[in-house]
Image (cartoon, rainbow, N blue to C red):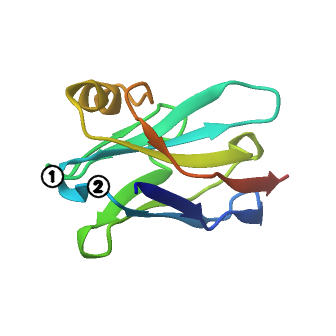
Amino acid sequence: EVQLQASGGGLVQAGGSLRLSCATSGFRFDDSYIAWIRQAPGKERVGVSCIMISAGSTYYDDSVKGRFTVSSDNAKYTVYLQMNSLKPEDTAVYYCAAGTTAQAMVACSDVDYYGMDSWGKGTLVTVSS
């Protein structure tokens, strides 16, 4: 059974940092593409970052470039999202999602989530001003 579990959210002041974790199981982690997606209140889901696990390639939405860093610990089948210099507009529920297909690979490079067919429950990040 494929499982993804995002954790690490919380309340932080603007300018602060949080590290989200996405623990995974049940699929070939080394061959996967794992995206972070967020959904702010009343808004659509938006891709934030993505990592191609085998290549180690990383991609970011312009809104988080230079502030967020995605990484993986392949031995733990876990992906992290280090979020620095947080802004109130980063407030959202953050999800991690995984795919292993060619479509997922293209989505990853586009920092999008189509083709990511396995999703975890989100974790709420609230940034106060």
Q: Is residue 51 above or below residue 108?
A: below
Graded by Cα atoms within 10 Å as few (under 14), some (14 to 19) or many (20 or more), the crowding at tag 1 reads few
Identity, as a three-letter code, of the amino acid under mark 2: Phe
Front residue of 116 and 43: 116
Residue 93 location in percent, x, y? 70, 46
Residue to which mark 1 is pinned: 54
Quick one: quadrant of the N terminus? bottom left
Q: Left or right of 71: which side holds 68? A: right
Q: Which mark is residue 19?
A: none
Q: Secondary structure at mark 1?
A: loop
Q: Is residue 76 above or below residue 23?
A: below
Residue 116 location in percent, x, y? 40, 34
Looking at the image, which residue is at 74% across and 65% down? 10
Q: Is residue 58 above or below residue 16?
A: above
Q: Left or right of 41: which side holds 63? A: left
Distance from disc 1 to disc 2, alpha carbons, whole Å, reads 14 Å
Front residue of 122 and 68: 122
Q: Nearer the viewer, mark 1 or mark 2?
A: 2
Residue 31 location in percent, x, y? 18, 49
Q: Secondary structure at mark 2?
A: loop
Identity, as a three-letter code, of the amino acid under mark 1: Ser
Identify the residue at the far bottom of this view: 75
Residue to which mark 2 is pinned: 27
